[in-house]
Image: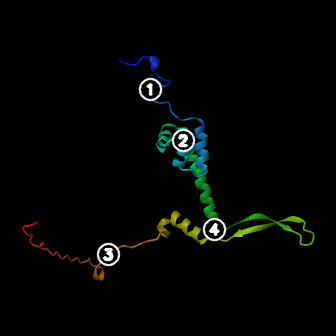
Amino acid sequence: MPAPKGNRNALGNKGGGRPSLFRAEYVHWAEKMARLGATDADLADALGVCETTINKWKRERLEFCEALKRGKQFSDAEVAEKLFRRATGYEHKAVKIVADAKTGAEHQVEYIERYAPDTTACIFWLKNRRPDLWRDRIDNTHSGPNGGAVQVESTVTFVNPPARSDDE
């Protein structure tokens, strides 16, 4: 027998079950935390739910899922840009505060700070962007003499156990 209409929620579904812990402000927090590099586990911990709940919200609430994607894409793009600048070298304006040796008066001196390309960043960038050209290749090919097949020999020795005494 169908449930009376009075027992249905706004979506027309039967009532029952625990109400969702989801709040509209979680969309904002999800994007903000993802921008800061938080994982789904970090987000779950901050919102006081388990990671499976976060995964459920990502499936059921498009705005929540999109907010997480936006935040993660923003952070990934920023890190990629910084890695590229580190790999290729960069410069920026800087200010140094110096004191006059005679009077002790402080004043600012502008200068250009320069950073040389970083070898490790270059290697990391190339291995990840162009693995077809830059990955470490390990050749585990096994071959016999003159590139032929590997010959395998096996020796099996059967050992007879000692005879058991009547006492055993």
Q: For mark 2, what is the residue?
A: 48
Q: Residue furthest bottom?
A: 146
In which image quadrant can residue 115 be found? bottom right
Left or right side of 143 for 3: right
Label 1: element kind: loop
| Amino acid bearing label 2 | Gly
Q: CA distance from mark 3 to mark 4?
A: 40 Å
Residue at (90% x, 66% y) in the render = 105
Q: From the viewer's perspective, is the residue at label 3 or at label 1 nearer?
A: 1
Tag on residue 16? Answer: 1
Question: How packed is label 4: few (under 14 Cα within 10 Å), some, or many (20 or more)?
Answer: some
| Amino acid bearing label 4 | Thr
Q: For mark 4, what is the residue?
A: 88
Above or below: residue 8 compared with residue 97? above
Q: Residue furthest front?
A: 167
| Amino acid bearing label 3 | His
Left or right side of 38 for 97: right
Label 3: element kind: loop
- Image marks 1 and 2: residues in contact by CB distance under 8 Å: no
Indicate which disc, 3 or 4, sits on the residue closer to the N terminus: 4
The percent coordinates of residue 147 (x first, y second) are 30, 79
Indicate which disc, 4 or 1, sits on the residue closer to the N terminus: 1
Tag on residue 142? Answer: 3
Left or right side of 158 for 102: right
Indicate which disc, 2 or 3, sits on the residue closer to the N terminus: 2
Colour mapping: rainbow
Q: CA distance from mark 4 to mark 2?
A: 42 Å
- Image marks 2 and 3: residues in contact by CB distance under 8 Å: no
